[in-house]
Image (cartoon, rainbow, N blue to C red):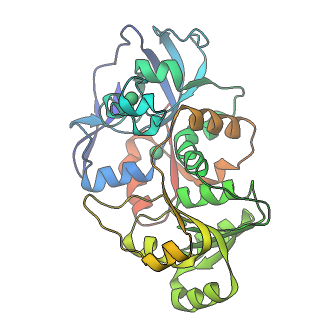
């Protein structure tokens, strides 16, 4: 079969590899549609601590079941399915504490990192994912389901927030994750604002009914934002120290700050202790997803609660993945659909 194999950063080769086989407990799918993700881009550009080279990358997918050797009896041969990129072990210290997103064994079956991913004609779904994080689709409009994993990460972060009707929510970051947070926020309140870059991107975000501030006019905006708005919730979705600091500055006293975009290893963040203590700021971190957020994400997509297809700005064939990743790097595309079947 044809697959996109990453040998090292910036060495992504489309080549013929042997067709994968499902072992006991696993499910073999024919990949129909996949999506690029910010993590794919980062991994392509600078590698990833968890990846085992050479590796078929890609972890957002929809496929047709070719063979089911798992215990999941709800899934049959010929079904169109969507799944997560990982699943917890339910056995480690963190799983026993129900902190499933912190499972110590997540990386044992992480698609596109430790198990061959979906930028290929066929993919094996590991046992744990087959049993808990895999769903049969309810309709033929399957492309939108491929966003299951990024939406689940966002849903997971929202479980830590307390947003009431009429609250003011600010998202920092105009990438797909920032937009997904803004679309989630709209389910709770009409007062949703996003601070981000790229004029065309911001007008697309406006069309989704979200107010925007242009980051390129940062200082003017910062002054205006600070003087006019009291944000009950601020969500950082960029992953830079600058964005973390800005998010802290813009949250109101008593408000919630969700630091969603991860920083590099050994990074430090310094915040004003007076504002945290006397201002009762609730600082929260959120990582990955858990089976509950995967299930909720599936339901939000299935019921068309979130217009998730708006994030897919172009489509290419498997051969053109590198082209797609480079377009993302330039900010021309948000998520690119990879048509495989
Ligand atoms: Zn992803
Ligand atoms: Zn675990």
Residue 311: where, in percent of width, then height? 60, 54
Q: Quadrant of ligand 2?
A: top left
Residue lying farthest to the front in this orientation = 278
Would residue 222 appear left or right of 228 to someone viewing this image?
A: left
Would residue 305 appear left or right of 324 to someone viewing this image?
A: right
Work out whether residue 28 or residue 97 is closer to the camera in this orientation and state it: 97
Residue 170 seen: no
Q: Say which quadrant the N terminus sits in.
A: top left
- The residue sitting at 36% across, 74% down in the picture is 270
Residue 185: where, in percent of width, then height? 69, 58
Would you place residue 247 above or below residue 178 in this image? below
Q: Quadrant of residue 118?
A: top left
Would you place residue 141 above or below residue 268 in this image? above
- The residue sitting at 21% across, 37% down in the picture is 53
- The residue sitting at 68% across, 39% down in the picture is 301
Residue 45: where, in percent of width, then height? 29, 56
Residue 72 seen: yes
- The residue sitting at 59% across, 10% down in the picture is 76
Would you place residue 38 above or below residue 65 in this image? below
State the count of labels: 0
Would residue 51 appear left or right of 137 to someone viewing this image?
A: left
């Amino acid at each position: 079969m044809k697959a996109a194999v990453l040998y090292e950063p910036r060495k992504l080769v489309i080549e013929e590899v042997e067709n994968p086989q499902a072992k006991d407990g696993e499910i073999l799918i024919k990949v129909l549609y996949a999506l690029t993700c910010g993590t794919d881009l980062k991994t392509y550009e600078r590698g990833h601590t968890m990846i085992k080279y050479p590796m078929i990358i890609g972890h957002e997918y929809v496929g047709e079941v070719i063979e089911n050797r798992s215990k999941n009896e709800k899934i049959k041969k010929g079904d169109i399915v969507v799944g997560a990129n990982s699943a917890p072990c339910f056995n480690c210290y963190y799983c026993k504490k129900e902190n499933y997103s912190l499972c110590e064994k997540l990386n044992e079956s992480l698609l596109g990192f430790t198990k061959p991913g979906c930028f290929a004609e066929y993919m094996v779904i590991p046992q744990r994912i087959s049993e808990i994080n895999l769903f049969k689709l309810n309709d033929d409009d399957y492309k939108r389901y491929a966003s299951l994993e990024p939406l689940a990460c966002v849903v997971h972060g929202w479980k830590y927030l307390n947003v009431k009707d009429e609250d003011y929510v600010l998202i920092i970051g105009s990438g797909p994750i920032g937009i997904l947070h803004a679309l989630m926020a709209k389910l709770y309140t009409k007062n949703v604002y996003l601070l981000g870059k790229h004029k065309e991107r911001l007008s697309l975000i406006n069309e989704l009914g979200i107010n925007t501030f242009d980051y390129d006019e940062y200082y003017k905006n910062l002054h205006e934002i600070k003087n006019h708005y009291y944000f009950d919730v601020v969500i950082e979705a960029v992953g830079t120290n600058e964005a973390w600091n800005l998010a802290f500055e813009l949250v109101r006293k008593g408000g919630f700050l969700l630091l969603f975009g991860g920083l590099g290893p050994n990074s430090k963040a310094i915040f004003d202790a007076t504002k945290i203590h006397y201002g009762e700021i609730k600082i929260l971190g959120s990582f990955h997803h858990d089976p509950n957020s995967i299930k909720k994400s599936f339901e939000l997509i299935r019921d068309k609660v979130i217009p998730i297809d708006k994030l897919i700005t172009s489509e290419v064939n498997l051969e053109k993945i590198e082209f797609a990743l480079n377009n993302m790097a330039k900010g021309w595309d948000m998520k690119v659909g990879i048509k495989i079947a």
